[in-house]
Image (cartoon, helix red, strand yellow):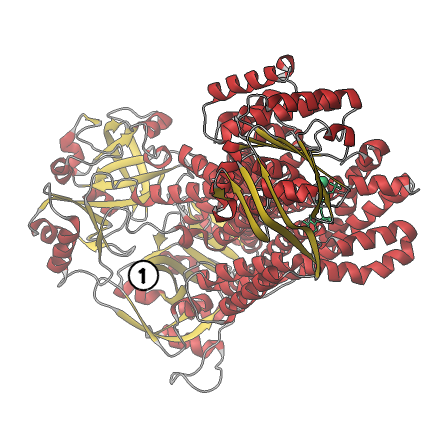
Amino acid sequence: MNPALVRGLVLRWTLRHRLRAALGIAAVALGVAAYLASAAVARSVMLTGTAATSALAGGADLVVAADETGLPTALLGDVRGVPGVTAAAPLVTSWVRIASMPGRRAMVVGIDPLAETRMRRRAGGVDPSKNAAVADPVAFAMGGGAIVAMPLAEELGLAVGGVLHLQGAGGGRSFTVAGTFDIPGDAPRGNAGRVVLVSVGAARLLLARGDRVDRIDVTLDSGRDPGAAADAIRAALAPKAPPSLLVGPPGMADPSTGDVLGAVDVGLKLGAVVALLVGVFLIHHTVSIGVTERRREVGILRALGATRGQVLLVFCVEAVVLGLIGAALGIGLGWAVATTSLQGVASTISGTYFPSEPAPVEVSALLALSGLAVGAFVALVAAFVPARRAAGEAPNDAVRRGPEESVRGRLMPAPRAAAALVFAVATAFFVWGPDIRLRGYYAIFSLLVAFVASAPTMLVLGARAIAPLLRLVAGVPGELAAEELARRPARAALPAAALAFGLALVVETLGIVESLSKGTIEWMEENVAGDLFVSSGRTVLAGGGHTPLEASLAGTLRSVPGVETVVAVRTLRIPWNGTRVFILALDIPQFRRMTHLHVSGSDAAGAGGLRPRDAILADVETGAACLISENFSALHGTQIGDTIELPSSDGRIPLRVAGTFPDYSWPRGTVLMSRRVVEERMRDGLADQFSVMLAPGATFSDVAPRVEAAVGTGRELVVTSGPEFRAAARALLSDFFRLGYAQVAVSLSVAFLGVFNGLWIAVVLRRREIGLLRAAGATRGQVVGSIVMQAACLGAVGATFGLLGGIAVEWIALRRVLVADTGWYAQFVVPWGPLSIVVVLGVIASALAGIIPARAAVRTELRDALSYE
Amino acid sequence: MLEVRDVGKTYREGGREVHAVRGVSLRVEPGEMVVLLGRSGSGKSTLLHLLGGLDRPSSGSVLFEGRDLASLHDDALTRLRRDRIGHVFQFFNLLPTLTAAENVALPILLGGTSDRVATARARAALDEVGLADRADHFPEEMSGGEQQRTAIARALAVRPSLLLADEPTGNLDTDTGREVLGLLRGLTADGTRSIVMVTHDEQAALVGDRRIRLKDGRIEREER
Ligand SMILES: Nc1ncnc2c1ncn2[C@@H]1O[C@H](COP(=O)(O)OP(=O)(O)OP(=O)(O)O)[C@@H](O)[C@H]1O
Ligand SMILES: [Mg+2]
């Protein structure tokens, strides 16, 4: 379209209706901001995770790995023997404590210097042959030397020749600094900056890895197809390799967003989607009112020779302009929110899952661009229908008639009725029909569309129901309000629907937060039993960040006076059924004595009545059975009595499912099994934490120092009391849920914007009518009263529908989306208390939103209003 | 140039039929100025819309430069309106967000002509109606007569062969109205352009070559 026309027909028009445009822009801005902020948080968390798991993968063509217990070193020779493999380098990594600096940690990376030299291509700042100044290669190769990342060396004041004491699961070891290396600017600094390279042999001793390595990095002869090479390696290793063997591109073992973020991710996505939907809504309304008001202009344009396409373009360009401005503001807002208030949230989530420094929350240029695209797209979608209506306008009709709406709205026009019906049926189909991918999202989407389509009708019915009441309590203004509501349903529907939408989201979010937090906190109170917890480096909440200890310390702990029972807890996340499941390995005999776990299970035959927890745990103790979490059962379709096979280094370990238990620790499912099996079959004798039950009469303050004295030397123990530990866990959970409350704030603002926008427009369109009313003798007070009354009425009806819709969405989100995604079958809680406050606030906000346009309307000079046409 | 054969237009409103125009036939020759007269509701505007391709007849045919408008689909009809026919309406003639020059340039721009050319032609047309100094004013900054002259300039700017004016003086005082009528009359002087004008002002009607009186959608009488 000609730029002069864009300027004259679009920009000037928009500038003349600044406030209206501003509301649409604000809604898009909020939606885009919510989208960006959530994407940025997700990205930060994923970056942290990727950095932690594959900070050092650069340069490798393929990675050979297994589960967290690693690979036998013997496989290295087999890999090197595969044709096409240039070099294969073993790798062992773990976070360890720095003995000289309590609380600080280093990431030990054990490498084979000879193999590394042959690989030559390792990037990520840890290529000892390139970036490092190695003063004493021999010492390094012999195991006594370490090459330290520059930032860490600076922090510790270490120079070449200095001594670094590290504390791993295998005890303390000293390393002479043989060199330092710098990190290229683009590497994930947080983790790479804390790397200490040692020889793989030294790392195995330090970390108590026996003859195992974590990973083998492979480079291929140039031109080799990685897929074929991976197959060849798999075939070559088949006889000896553990069943959990993974061969693939670097990063293959990284967890997915869904793995890590689980419910949080679902919530963030829903929030952004709904905020954008409201944006669609407001832009739609802005454009569609513009179309109504500009009917005559459209007529002139058409009479002068504008084609339908050109008219369509005018309105679409208008919408895109609004959308782009909104998106630009949204990018700014999203960036501000993401980099300030969300950094803490992202760090909490990262810290929960990964033992690494959290990556900063950033809005990349690409993300910002996608925000712009989303804004423009949303605006286009919103504008398309009214723009089509404008383009379809018969030119003579539009010239002849004024800006009044041409057709009186029927209660429910056929197309809308059809849409409402189709989408209602679709909702039902997605809720109760076959279990297809993303069904929950589809269900919510169709529910929302059905909701929008039927909103005006619902509103009229609601308004009709309230009308007699209005007349009764408010006299003439009430009468006027009731009449207007019943007569112009479509116009009144926007504010009500916007309110309903916003409130629906609030209800949904609050409901989900309440449901999940109630479930998780109850679960935690019940299951995180113990009076005292012992770990190393850091308390163990959801995983990561601590240094595993030798499980055998449990024996020492048991002999500490005042200690009654000690359970060594080992947690692993191992590949299973295309994802990674959480293994909770416990000393079952001790666990049996202290747990309050709610276990459901039946007898060995898989039939019959429920058995007591103790009998089921006795089964688990044999090593032939396990418990699975309820979400494991839901996600993987595993039933009590089924047998699951876990991979291990010496063949598969079959475990019969003896029962299920509620669990919220991992969105992909948890297996509770005997730690003895892990130790014997997976050759993993470590413990992440010890749960201690105190003897009657013993107190935490008595026992904690004794624990420290008994096993604390050189281990940097963290001893936490039961209440302290649970409080920390609760704080962590509420951090997660804080995100939900941010969403509530966004929804409420969006709802308010919608109400305000809708009422303002309704008043603008009725200016002439209001003028006539005033001329006919209505006082200002009566006019303002009628508009405010209308607003309050819309508020009440909108809030009611919002409440119902929100509860429905919450139900779908919990029972379909969340269940499909995480298997968590959270209790369905409707938080009536907070909700009733929100609803009352909605009605009041809506009434208040009516006051401003109402006052503006009565301030319009009578003459002006009447000469409107 | 323009020939109307037995054309009728029926509106259906809530089950009731309104015959706005019935069985009207007329010819307009090049250089001729025809005035449509009649009482309110007699079908003048409807007939004018049929002539200009703004509306399609329910029966009969409208032939413009030998082409039956009914046979053209919407886009072709739109292009014809844009390039060959000028419209002047009674009110709300101008787009409020465009300056006088931009309003005049609008149909030219819609045809895809470049900005520069369109602006030059628009200014020339404004000059023709004596409004060169108002080019950068918005409609609300102009008097009714100036607005109407701007609208005429816009109708002229595309160099149409037919100009349709629906009560162009309806909103103007007598003197200004006379000025506008003089302007319109002058446009047919070279014998290539035709004008059809609707009015119910008998005085105004006298400028035409012919006066056609409508009553209840029919031609009641024709005067020379
Ligand atoms: N879109 C329409 N739908 C229904 N009836 C219409 C429509 N347009 C015009 N009419 C009717 O057709 C008849 C002729 O209308 P028209 O506008 O042509 O009259 P007019 O002679 O131009 O009157 P005026 O001098 O008041 O402008 C009127 O009775 C009018 O009500
Ligand atoms: Mg008329």
Q: Residue at x 50, y 52 (%)?
A: A264
Q: Residues within 10 Å of mark 1 (few under 14, many from 20)?
A: few
Q: Is mark 1 within 8 Å of ligand 1?
A: no
Q: From this viewpoint, which residue is outermost toward the bottom?
A: A608
Residue A401 visible? The answer is no
Q: What residue is rendered at 84% in x and 39% in y?
A: A771
Q: Nearer the viewer, residue A788 or A610?
A: A788
Question: At 77% across and 28% down in the image, what residue appears?
Answer: B203
Question: Most extreme residue toward the top, as rendered?
Answer: B133
Measured from the top left, where is residue A140 in percent x and y? 18, 34
Judged from the image, the quadrant occupied by ligand 2 is top right
Relative to A222, say whether B120 is above or below.
Answer: above
Decide if residue B114 is in sight here: yes
Q: Is A620 located above or below residue A457 in the figure?
A: below
Which chain does tag 1 point to?
Answer: A
Q: Please determine whether, in this image, residue A499 is positioned above or below residue A858.
A: below
Residue type marked 1: Gly
Decide which of A834, B156 is in the foreground and name it.
Answer: B156
Q: Position of residue A802 (x, y in %)?
A: 67, 56
**Residue designated by label 1:** A578
Report the quarter where the C terminus of chain A lies. top right
Q: Quadrant of residue B114?
A: top left
- Horizontally, is A249 left or right of A695 in the view? left
Q: Position of residue A614 (x, y in %)?
A: 47, 76
In this rendering, position of residue A311 left or right of residue A501: left
x and y, in percent, of residue A168 in the image: 32, 45
In the depicted view, which residue is nearer to us: A236 or B109? Answer: B109
Report the number of numbered marks: 1
The quadrant in which residue A668 appears is bottom left
Position of B170 relative to A610 (above/below): above
Which secondary structure, mark 1? loop
